[in-house]
Amino acid sequence: MLKLFRRTKEEELADQQRLHDSLEKTRSGFMGRLSTLFQPNELTEQTWEELEETLIMGDVGVETTLALVEKVRQRARQEGLKRTDQVQAVLKQEMLALLDHPAEMALDEPRLLTVVLVVGVNGSGKTTSIAKLAKLYKDHGRKVVLAAADTFRAAAVRQLEIWGERVGVDVISQGQGADPGAVVYDAIRACQESRQADLLIVDTAGRLHTKYNLMKELEKVRNVAARQVHKAPHEVFLVLDATTGQNGLSQARHFKEAVDITGVILTKLDGTAKGGIVFAISKELGVPVRFVGTGEKVDDIAFFDARTFVESLFK
Ligand SMILES: Nc1nc2c(ncn2[C@@H]2O[C@H](COP(=O)(O)OP(=O)(O)OP(=O)(O)O)[C@@H](O)[C@H]2O)c(=O)[nH]1
Ligand SMILES: [Mg+2]
């Protein structure tokens, strides 16, 4: 009954390809200079300046950029590197080190019922990402149920229900205005009893009358899950719209304070040149990017793979 998530080699390659393709705009933007920066054979002060500028313009963030460049410079000095290709290799290594997080996700561990909260500001792509995750995990043998705990916005419940029908998974809802905690309580009971489900994904509100209320509500939803299921929520995914770049990062900090975020789903990577934000999320937020949204269709999601990501930036 308990199934581990396993991808075939083909699925893994297809995922890496989707991630690579979604970075098209990032490569043709500022970050594209990464591959040409190291063309000349000589390393000059200008190379370092250009590297710094490229990373900052590519949305890596000032703090992360300065730390990264300093680290690479220091290593180049210590290791006596003269050739630009050697420095590029060190840069890639240090970029990878920034993205170093445990590869395993609680989501993929075998468990009777796994509860996943999905949070993020409105319009970031929560509902779409939930549908994508639901399909992905359903296709890999999980029995998935969705909970419509975004009860604030009029159309939110209906939107989730429509996605549920399309993807072929049950949606537990109590309509607009219902208490989100009660919806989650009900949904967990349904998973454990009538629906016999092993994965519950909870859609939450992205906006309330005040930010304070929103964070309080998310905490409450979290506590309801924690009381009912051992160690729940097993994952709290923050959905971040990549096109918002550094602004998205400051919103993310509020969510991180209210609910312990375990990972980021970075959406709309296909529509932006701001792919460098991945480094800032990892370093400044301290949480791994787990999935990226690569388009608007239900299959447009990829597991985030740090090595593919870094290599893709230089191609
Ligand atoms: N190109 C692209 N568009 C995306 C992606 N993910 C979501 N979108 C689009 O972003 C828009 C908002 O997505 P939703 O899933 O409704 O966002 P939400 O966070 O649930 O928004 P609210 O329910 O209003 O809080 C939709 O038009 C989606 O099609 C992605 O990875 N790539
Ligand atoms: Mg929504």
Image (tube, helix red, strand yellow):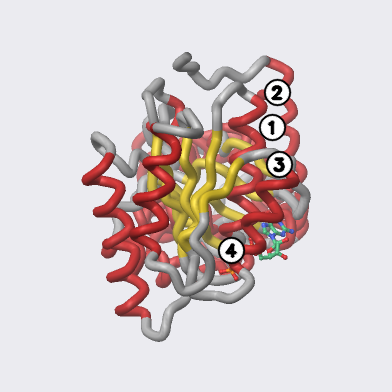
Q: CA distance from mark 2 to mark 1?
A: 6 Å
Q: Badge 2 is on which residue?
A: 11
Task: Kindly identify which numbered label has been placed on residue 15.
Answer: 1
In the foreground, 252 or 41: 252
Tag 2 near tag 1, CB within 8 Å: yes
Q: Badge 3 is on which residue?
A: 167
Q: Is residue 310 above or below residue 266?
A: above
- Quadrant placement of the C terminus: top right
First in sequence: mark 3 vs mark 4: 4
First in sequence: mark 3 vs mark 2: 2
Asked if ligand 2 lies within 8 A of label 4, the reply is no
**How crowded is the residue under tag 4: few (<14 C-alpha within 10 Å), some, or many (20+)?**
many
Please report the residue visible at 34 percent of the width from the left and 39 percent of the height from the top: 234
Tag 3 near tag 2, CB within 8 Å: no
Tag 4 near tag 2, CB within 8 Å: no
Please report the residue visible at 40 percent of the width from the left and 20 percent of the height from the top: 110
Q: CA distance from mark 4 to mark 1?
A: 30 Å
Q: Amino acid at mark 4?
A: Val
